[in-house]
Image (tube, rainbow, N blue to C red):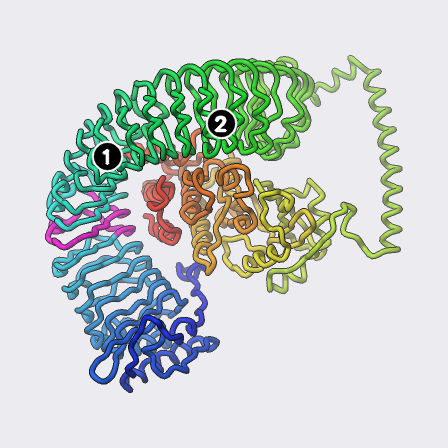
């Protein structure tokens, strides 16, 4: 199947133009009539578009096109002429080389007065060159042409006929090939945007466009060095070369761009030194060169005028210049993950709101002057060699929302001044040498604090019961300290908590009732806890990891643990458990070694013969009792069956015997095959049978249902009574589902029908489930998923997500992970749970958005601060999925998120290959090269900054062109 045969590239519907062109424009004061010629052209243009889509009705009652809302005219003598035509975002579609396209662009070419033409954000696939680019010299006065965000492909056309162009925007298309002489005739060009295409080759030579002010070439595949003659474009204010394959040394000639305001060199392979000449540009406000291979020291004076500086993920070394952080213009600095040494400068800009210095080898103390930065919002000094105490002056940073001092050599007690940071959301102090107890003042952060990580320190004393006052806390990590005493009973009141790690301490006593919303992990390992495993743990129905190892628990393993289908890991090793271990499903890893008197269920079966010899009387009694029970059960079943048969003959059939009453059952698909196959009466029968379960996710349970005609469907059950489901109205739920039911994409699970009861919703889908991406990637240990399959999965998910984001009303995903992507085959993924964002209200959860949005490891960092699901957030989750497929590692391993691990190992080129799954990367040089290209895409997607992540459309294009 060709690239443009894919459903993603099908044209959008042509929207009605009546709301765009036929309404009177309040902005247009022209009352003069167009010339007869131009009136005729505009009328023909209207009819040309109508003829290609006859269902579109244009209201042309106003005879003067100058009063149409997207047409601008200006007076010329006794009449007016058309100067601007804006058809952006109206759903315009033209197929390549079609007669309708030829007619449309042929008419545009006759508007000889046109100065501005905007056709952006449509579905243009091809523009007939013979009618427009080659023979359209009549548009000699055209100054602005915007064709961005379409589907144009092929080589870049020649623009020599448009010699007056000042602005040309071709971004977000699929143009390919090199940029050579096609733009040579544009001597008046001021703004050129070719970003997010498939261009390759060396950077275009634009020597004839000396007036160029904006040059944007980002997100292509340009390679080679930045030409030294770039310094000749003295009028440049914006130069964006990010996300390409540029290499070599950046010439000092770039410092000649005396009017430059923004310079973006990020995500290339540039090396050498940071040009010192940049410090001469007094207008430079933003400089980003992150994710490259720059070496040497950071030039002094480079931030004298700069407001935003990002040099992260390079190989920069030496000390941070004393003046680098002091300029009053400076608001954001990111130097993380380099090889910087020495102290943090004391002179700091009062206007800093972001300071990221993590992942270096900085030493010395945290300067007390940081406490003077009242605007500071994000402070990350993690993964360095800082050896001081945490200065109490930190309490002066009243606007801090993120404080990360993890993995240093900090010592001393936790300053009570931390409790003054009332806006703090994330506090990470793990892997230091901090001592003493947790100050009570810290518990005053009850409004916003969501993440508290004090693990792997030397903290002592008891865990204060007042910690439960942190009512917004979602992640509490205190493992690897010296806490003693009992676990506070008050922890059970922390309703927002989804992760609790208390392992590696000296806690004693029994396990109290735990917060019901725990789902990531409960780790109580390596303590002095005893007693039996409490039944209250059975209420943790969403828990994924339970670790009670290396304690003194006694008694039998409760059978309820075997019924917790959310569990993926259960570690009960090295306790004093006894009896026979219950049988667990293959969906959970169970570790029970080191329990001297515990017998596994398989061992029990193997030794049953010896037991019979030792206790025959007991066995006989048990057998007789079981026979009696079976006879009694048979009598009961016979009675129930006779009543049921009587009812079937006497009454109309009822849906099961479960007291669940169907409120509404409705189709949302127009497909007659599905309409005739789906039997709503099967809903309760199937969903009341646990053996029909094929998958459980956080919010959904999937069942396999075989209809009377033999066709199989998947039924998904949503728990309507969960308080975070916002669909109080069945009618509103129906409306949302009917919108989703009209979608059509082979990589998206689209609902076909639904059944509503008072407390649940049941959605029908085509049954294509052969497992999830997670199953294929991490559970099939025998047959490793090969590279062609992994690549197809990446493309399929990217196409599905691009389709959902491109809908008229974009569909955002609340939970995108390898566990929510179903597999039709090893190469055909389908995105599931597309309705969750429509029916779940995060504000009704007791914590932050991160307590309900997504699975751990896939949740973008900004969700800790917001209550909004976003497109960049979805892109982050997609990036994690791509990293999983590239590395073969799960999203979280040993408490470390895959995205953070990959970013920390990507700063140096020598480490990037080590990120890749060796079982795949070593199959061939071609595969390794393609994986490295895709790794760049994945790392861009999981960027800490939402603004730095590519749009899904761009990510899809980059995946297509990975070589």
Count residues near mark 2 (Cα–Cα under 10 Å), then give few for <14, some for 14-19, many for 20+. Answer: many
- Residue 638: where, in percent of width, then height? 88, 41
Query: Which residues fall within the magenta stretch?
Result: 218-247
- Residue 702: where, in percent of width, then height? 62, 45
For the point 12% across and 45% down, the residue is 255
Count residues near mark 1 (Cα–Cα under 10 Å), then give few for <14, some for 14-19, many for 20+. Answer: many
Tell me the residue that label 2 is attached to. Answer: 476
Is residue 927 visible from the viewing direction of this image? no
Whether pointer 1 and pointer 2 mark residues with C-beta atoms closer than 8 Å, the reply is no
Q: Count of labels shown?
A: 2
Give the quadrant of the N terminus. bottom left
Tell me the quarter of the picture where residue 267 sits.
top left
The answer to if 234 sits in the magenta stretch is yes
Please state which of residues 825 and 116 is positioned toward the viewer in this rendering: 116
Tell me the residue that label 1 is attached to. Answer: 349
For the point 82% across and 22% down, the residue is 622
Tell me the quarter of the picture where residue 614 sits.
top right
Residue at the extreme bottom: 36
Mark 1 or 2, which is nearer the eye? 1
Q: In the image, is residue 164 above or below residue 529?
A: below
Going by the image, does 93 lie left or right of 78?
A: right
Which of marks 2 and 1 precedes in the sequence?
Answer: 1
For the point 65% across and 26% down, the residue is 536
For the point 79% across and 46% down, the residue is 657
Q: Using the numbered discs, state the Cα–Cα distance from disc 1 to disc 2 in whole angstroms.
A: 33 Å
Going by the image, does 499 lie left or right of 406?
A: right
Q: In the image, is residue 604 above or below residue 921?
A: above
The answer to if 751 sits in the magenta stretch is no
Going by the image, does 533 lie left or right of 11?
A: right
- Residue 28: where, in percent of width, then height? 31, 73
């Amino acid at each position: 199947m060709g690239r443009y045969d894919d459903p993603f590239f099908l044209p959008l519907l042509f929207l009605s133009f009546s709301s765009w062109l036929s309404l009177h424009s309040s902005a247009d004061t022209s009352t003069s009539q167009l010339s007869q010629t131009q009136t005729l052209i505009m009328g023909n243009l209207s009819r040309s578009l109508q003829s290609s889509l006859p269902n579109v009705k244009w209201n042309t009652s106003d005879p003067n096109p100058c009063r149409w809302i997207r047409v601008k005219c200006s007076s010329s003598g006794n009449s007016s002429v058309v100067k601007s035509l804006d058809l952006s975002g109206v759903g315009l579609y033209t197929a390549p080389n079609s007669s309708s396209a030829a007619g449309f662009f042929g008419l545009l070419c006759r508007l000889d007065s046109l100065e501005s033409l905007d056709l952006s954000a449509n579905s243009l696939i091809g523009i007939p060159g013979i009618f427009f680019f080659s023979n359209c010299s009549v548009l000699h006065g055209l100054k602005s042409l915007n064709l961005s965000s379409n589907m144009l492909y092929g080589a870049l056309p020649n623009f020599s006929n448009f010699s007056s162009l000042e602005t040309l925007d071709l971004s977000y298309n699929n143009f390919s090939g090199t940029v050579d002489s096609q733009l040579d005739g544009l001597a008046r060009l001021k703004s050129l945007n070719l970003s997010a295409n498939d261009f390759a080759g060396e950077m275009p030579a634009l020597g004839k466009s000396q007036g160029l002010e904006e040059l944007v070439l980002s997100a292509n595949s340009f390679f080679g060095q930045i030409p030294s003659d770039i310094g000749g474009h003295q009028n440049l204010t914006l130069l964006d070369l990010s996300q390409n394959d540029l290499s070599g040394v950046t010439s000092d000639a770039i410092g000649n761009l005396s009017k430059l305001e923004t310079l973006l060199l990020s995500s290339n392979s540039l090396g050498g030194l940071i040009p010192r000449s940049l410090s001469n540009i007094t207008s430079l406000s933003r400089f980003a060169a992150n994710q490259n291979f720059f070496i040497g020291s950071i030039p002094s004076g480079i931030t004298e005028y700069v407001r935003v500086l990002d040099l992260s993920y390079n190989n920069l070394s030496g000390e941070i210049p004393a003046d680098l952080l002091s300029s009053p213009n400076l608001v954001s600095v990111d130097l993380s993950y380099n090889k910087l040494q020495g102290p943090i400068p004391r002179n700091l800009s009062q206007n800093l709101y972001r300071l990221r210095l993590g992942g270096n080898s900085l030493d010395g103390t945290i300067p007390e002057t940081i406490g003077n930065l009242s605007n500071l919002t994000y402070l990350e000094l993690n993964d360095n060699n800082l050896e001081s105490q945490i200065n109490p002056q930190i309490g002066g940073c009243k606007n801090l929302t993120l404080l990360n001092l993890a993995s240093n050599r900090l010592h001393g007690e936790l300053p009570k001044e931390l409790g003054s940071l009332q806006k703090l959301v994330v506090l990470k102090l793990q892997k230091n040498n901090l001592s003493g107890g947790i100050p009570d003042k810290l518990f005053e952060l009850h409004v916003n604090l969501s993440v508290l990580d004090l693990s792997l320190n030397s903290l002592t004393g008891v865990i204060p019961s007042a910690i439960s006052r942190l009512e917004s806390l979602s992640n509490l990590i205190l493992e690897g300290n010296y806490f003693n005493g009992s676990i506070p009973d008050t922890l059970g009141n922390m309703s927002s908590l989804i992760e609790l790690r208390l392992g590696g301490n000296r806690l004693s006593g029994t396990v109290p009732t735990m917060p019901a919303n725990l789902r990531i992990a409960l780790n109580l390992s390596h303590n002095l806890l005893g007693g039996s495993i409490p039944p209250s743990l059975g209420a943790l129905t969403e828990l994924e990891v339970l670790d009670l190892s290396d304690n003194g628990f006694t008694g039998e393993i409760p059978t309820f643990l075997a019924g917790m289908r959310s569990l993926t890991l259960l570690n009960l090793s090295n306790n004093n458990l006894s009896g026979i271990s219950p049988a667990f499903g293959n969906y959970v890893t169970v570790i029970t070694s080191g329990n001297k008197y515990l017998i596994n269920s398989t061992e029990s079966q193997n030794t049953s013969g010896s037991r019979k010899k030792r206790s025959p009387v007991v066995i006989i009694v048990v057998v007789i009792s079981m026979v009696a029970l079976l006879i009694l059960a048979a009598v009961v079943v016979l009675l129930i069956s006779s009543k049921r048969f009587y009812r079937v003959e006497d009454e109309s059939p009822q849906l099961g015997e479960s007291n669940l009453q169907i409120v509404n059952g409705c189709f949302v698909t127009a497909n007659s095959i599905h309409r005739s196959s789906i039997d709503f009466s099967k809903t309760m029968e199937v969903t009341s049978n646990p053996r029909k379960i094929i998958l459980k996710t956080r919010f959904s349970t999937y069942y396999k249902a075989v209809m009377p005609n033999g066709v199989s469907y998947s039924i998904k059950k949503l728990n309507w009574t969960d308080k975070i489901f916002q669909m109080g109205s069945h009618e509103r739920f129906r409306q949302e589902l009917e919108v989703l039911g009209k979608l059509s994409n082979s990589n998206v699970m689209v609902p076909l029908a639904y059944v509503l009861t008072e407390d649940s919703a049941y959605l029908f889908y085509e049954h294509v489930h052969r497992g999830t991406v997670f199953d294929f990637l991490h559970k099939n240990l025998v047959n490793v998923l090969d590279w062609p399959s992994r690549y197809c999965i990446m493309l399929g998910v990217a196409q599905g997500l691009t389709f959902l984001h491109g809908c008229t009303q974009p569909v955002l995903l609340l939970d995108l992970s390898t566990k929510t992507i179903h597999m039709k085959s090893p190469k055909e993924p389908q995105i599931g749970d597309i309705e969750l964002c429509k029916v779940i209200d995060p504000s009704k959860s007791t914590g932050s958005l991160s307590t309900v949005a997504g699975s751990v490891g896939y949740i973008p960092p900004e969700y800790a601060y917001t209550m909004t699901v976003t497109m960049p957030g979805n892109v982050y989750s997609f990036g994690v999925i791509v990293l999983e497929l590239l590395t073969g590692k799960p999203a979280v391993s040993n408490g470390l998120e895959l995205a953070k691990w990959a970013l920390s190992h990507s700063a140096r080129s020598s480490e990037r290959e080590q990120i890749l799954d060796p079982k795949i990367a070593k199959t061939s040089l071609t595969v390794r090269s393609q994986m490295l290209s895709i790794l760049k895409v994945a790392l861009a997607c999981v960027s800490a900054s939402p603004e730095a992540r590519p749009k899904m459309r761009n990510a899809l294009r980059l995946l297509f062109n990975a070589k």
